[in-house]
Amino acid sequence: MPSPGSGGAASGVGRAASGAGGARTLIKRALAVGAGRAPAEGATLLIYHRVGGGTTDELDQPVGQFARQLELLSGHDVLSLDAALDRLDAGDRRPCFVLTFDDGFADLYEHAWPLLRRLGLPFTVYLASAYVDQPMRWEGTTAKGTTGRGLTWAQLGELVASGLCTVGNHTHHHVRPSALTTAELDSCSDAIAAGLGVRPAHFAFPWGVAVPELAGEIRARFRSAATGELGRNLPGGDPWTLRRVPVRRTDPESFFAAKLTGALGPERAYGGMVRLAKRMLSRGGA
């Protein structure tokens, strides 16, 4: 039973979160003004996490916003991860986009999958396999709001059977970079093979941080590995340190559109502002 006054406190937190999100949106809208519209060469891997999870977390996209983003993408070349890598291997610099979803939240199936299926858009799910049909909470998570639940094996099987979904390895327990081991890699791949009958050929580093010490082991196991480093991927680049572009809840439509063209100037400017703000906060607390 809620304690007295808890409703007011919750609404206050909600208003604070909404205010912070609104400020981020306004900043991004301003950064997107005058952004270059030159073609974006190479493969752009867009990072999603949740869709329609009902939280105010930056990684949780409202369904309507996600649908509008797919509409913007409809005028571009959206490929499977393997097809995009094939292009890069062939020296093809034409712009293409890959939809990637990290972790394996069930709301992907509930809210994103109907839209992706209707439009026939391929996508990749980087699965943290320990959380299949389980609450999505792991050590160090910064997710806000109600804990999501993982996809079930039956749901994943339906996605894969459609021919649109590629399932990749995201470690078994979504471990920190310092805890990444070959056992974590193999436990995830073994679970996916047992649950879906296919062994993953692609990997995404949890937390987006590459682990150079395991580079040889990762190359031996996967065709590609994705990081959280911002950027596009061109022919001749390293397929085991693929760059990606995050998509966040507070991205206005103009800011999202800027991710699809040019040199990612607004995205880089926003990232610089966030890093500066964090440094200032850390100094203030010292």
Image: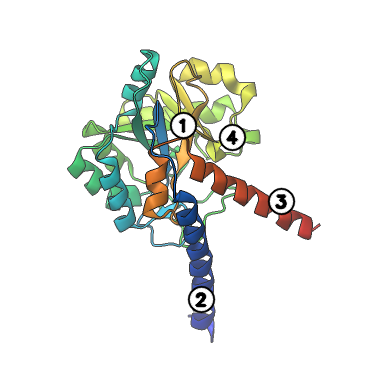
The residue that disc 2 covers is: 10
Image spot of residue 168 (x, y percent) = 40, 31
- The furthest residue to the left: 118
The residue that disc 1 covers is: 188
Task: Kindly report the distance in space between the C-alpha atoms of the residues bearing marks 2 and 4.
Answer: 34 Å
Q: Is residue 9 above or below residue 52?
A: below
The answer to whether the residues at label 2 and label 4 have Cβ atoms under 8 Å apart is no
Task: Kindly report the distance in space between the C-alpha atoms of the residues bearing marks 1 and 2.
Answer: 37 Å
Earlier-in-chain disc, 4 versus 1? 1
**Tag nearer the camera, 1 or 2:** 2
- Please say whether residue 258 is visible from this viewpoint: yes
Earlier-in-chain disc, 1 versus 2? 2
Q: Label 3 neighbourhood size at 10 Å, few (<14), some (14-19), many (20+)? A: few
**Tag nearer the camera, 3 or 2:** 3
Q: Is residue 228 left or right of residue 198?
A: right
- Image quarter (top left, top right, bottom left or bottom right) of the C terminus: bottom right
